[in-house]
Amino acid sequence: MKITCHRQSHTIGSREFSAARTADGVAELWADTDDALACALGAAHAADRLVQMVMARIVGQGRISECLSDNETTFAIDLFMRRMGFRREADREVEQLTPDARRFADAYSAGVNHVIATRRRPLELVLVKHHPDEWVPADTLLTIKLMSYLGLAQSQQDAEKLIIQAIHGGASTETLRRFFSPLLDDLDDETATAIRGLEYLEPLIPPAVRFLPGAPKVAASNNWAVAGSRSASGNAIQCNDPHLECNRLPAIWYEAVMHTPEDDRVGATMPGVPGIVMGRTRELSFGFTYGFMDMTDYFVEDCRDGGCRRGDGYVELEIRSENVRRKKNPDSEITIRENDLGVLEADPVSAELVDGFYLTRAWSGQRGGTAASLDAIRRVVHAPTVVEAQRILREVSISCNWVLADRAGNIGYQQSGLLPDRRHSGVHPVPAWRIDNHWRGIVTAERLATESNPADGIVVTANNEINPPGGLVAVNLPMGSYRHDRIRALLEARTDHTPETMKAIQLDLVSLQAEALMEIWRPLLPDSLAGRLLARWDLHYDADSRGATLFEEVYHEVLRRVCGERLFGREAWDALVEETAILADYYHLFDRVLLSDDAFWWGDDGREVIVGRVLDELLTQLDPYHVMPWGSRRRVTMHNIFFDGKLPRFLGFDHGPIALPGNRATVVQGGIFTAHGRTTTFAPSWRFITDMGTQVVQTVLAGGPSGSRFSKWYTTDVRRWLEGDYKTIDFGGE
């Protein structure tokens, strides 16, 4: 199938549909049934994004070394994915699909496979001599699992592994307890001693895995809704703003407009998955941010004679062997050790397990739920009200904060995710031999946080803490509340909001983090040109700002001296900053130190002396006209996910370089990391605004509809995205 700007009819098996593109290249699909529409979307995904889909599948299967490229980096990724068991779990969960969900997934697969069978292979797959297998429902579930883990559960795992590594490296438990207070209050000496004696310790999630191209990753995001009492039209307004890796082409999301005789829909889809995951129907609008629910835990294992201690006895490890095929190197047989809690961290290429202490990694996403997530995606577009959609979306296995609005004027919030029912904080490892530490199961969906029609007419999430007072603690390590607080303040400031005022909020560059720190730092600034420039800074992280550059130089140097030298050590700190997203995700923990005057952190010199010394050293002799504007320091290239920057720019597979505004604490989050020789960014990947009294949405995508460099739709939205512009889509039918 080829999608053109002219509506064309198609038949795949018994399923009939028609397809066209809007003036902006967005796929528009018509069918009489949801299954036929799923088939149409599968064909559209394969026509525009097959390479993206195939790469994600290969990654999740742990077959990069076999199918794409064989080197030590790709082999490390394959090892990680095999041990996580994504493919095996996806195969198993196919049997858990409801009959309706199975037909939905089968129809989608039929659309994908029609394109695979009838169209020429994309250039990228020809170059690596890869003939893609047929798409099957397990591949869809695998894609959902990857999305659930990469950038989501992964961030929680990073935080816990950081604590483990700090203890293993000799960090004081008292220091860690203070830094993470009160989350480590129950960390006892027995556990700390066992961690320090670990026989095998993997690093934080390998950079090769965290930053690999081709896999769907979600980071920080914003979403909100206001009731008609706060809009000029008297209708509810709903906005989505997910933050993902944006220095890649094609974009992670794929926009689509879809019609059946009963409904019209528009929104963001995930290539590999049928259905809209964020967007609008006639009656409902919905979108999600990452909920920061803690779905992962590490357990300390006492292993003896191939078994793990449980109480006064030992239970045998389950051993699974897998063969990793390689294109250039001999195949590798790996050993994966599992128990009743999860996967044991041990050398996968060694058949021997030395007695001693090890870690087991448990992730609730390995306990099912993906089949239910697909069914929820299928059903939510038929929900006529916020209340009904909340009942459906709470069954999603991914940790999400859903914000919703309906045409009747209702707004609401719903939490989703598989929350372990645990007795401990979940932030640090606990001894596995104490049975009381084991999960008691998964918290029922009915207990997850929900809210409908708040009195102030505002619902906002921005990866902030969402734990009801005295209620269920699902989020133990949220991001800082700066973005949430800024959005809420702007929403509270008026009662006549329009899509235009919502655009201004989505494009806001003010940092409340900088405001809080500058209150302390401003009196300490030297009377120099650079000092005066920083004093006059308006707290905006726009591309032309030199004040933002100066602030960040001071911020990172103060952190290095206080947290780097006194808490983690210089080497560990440098690795943390350069190779992980810890600072970007959990900056509020570090800010608690910088905003305090506790001598425990600052020593005898005290906060004002140390900060003043940094300010004098950095700003006294500095010529501010030699300071690079914020955007000039943050220029990145959008690389094609397959070639990953390895081709000359003139060939047109890459776009840029581009300047990213914003930073970790601004509404326009602009996170940039370099790890494993690769730069990545997390920024607004898709902006969406809709007034529920219309059938109009305004959107912009960090990319374009097509994944083919040779398509006119490869980067069509990028200019709008960079300039803060939007396109308008009327999804009201013919």
Image (cartoon, grey):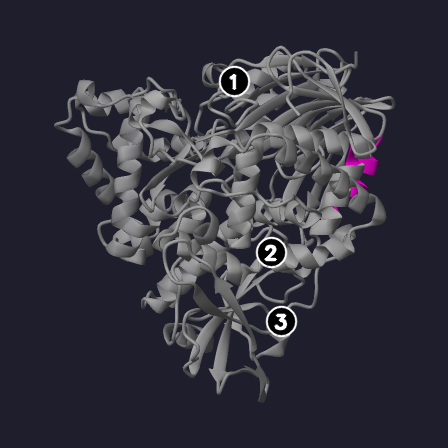
Residues drawn in magenta: 380-394
Residue 654 position by quadrant? top left
Residue 35: x percent and y percent?
80, 35
Q: Is residue 54 in the magenta section?
A: no
In the rendered image, is residue 268 in sight?
yes
Where disc 3 sits, the SS reads loop
What amino acid type should be assigned to the residue bearing mark 2? Arg
Q: Is residue 274 left or right of residue 626?
A: right
Residue bearing the label numbered 3: 438
Q: Earlier in the sequence, mark 3 or mark 1?
A: 3
Tell me the distance, in whole angstroms, between the alpha carbons under discs 3 and 1.
Answer: 48 Å
Residue 78: x percent and y percent?
46, 56
Marks 3 and 2 in Cβ contact (< 8 Å): no
Marks 3 and 1 in Cβ contact (< 8 Å): no
Residue bearing the label numbered 2: 87
Mark 2 Cα shell of 10 Å, populated few (<14), some (14-19), many (≥20): many
Residue at screen point 32% across, 66% down: 169
In the rendered image, is residue 484 in sight?
no
Q: Is residue 74 left or right of residue 396?
A: left
Residue 711 lies, with reference to residue 592, above or below; the image says: above
Residue lying at the far left in this picture: please name it. Answer: 621
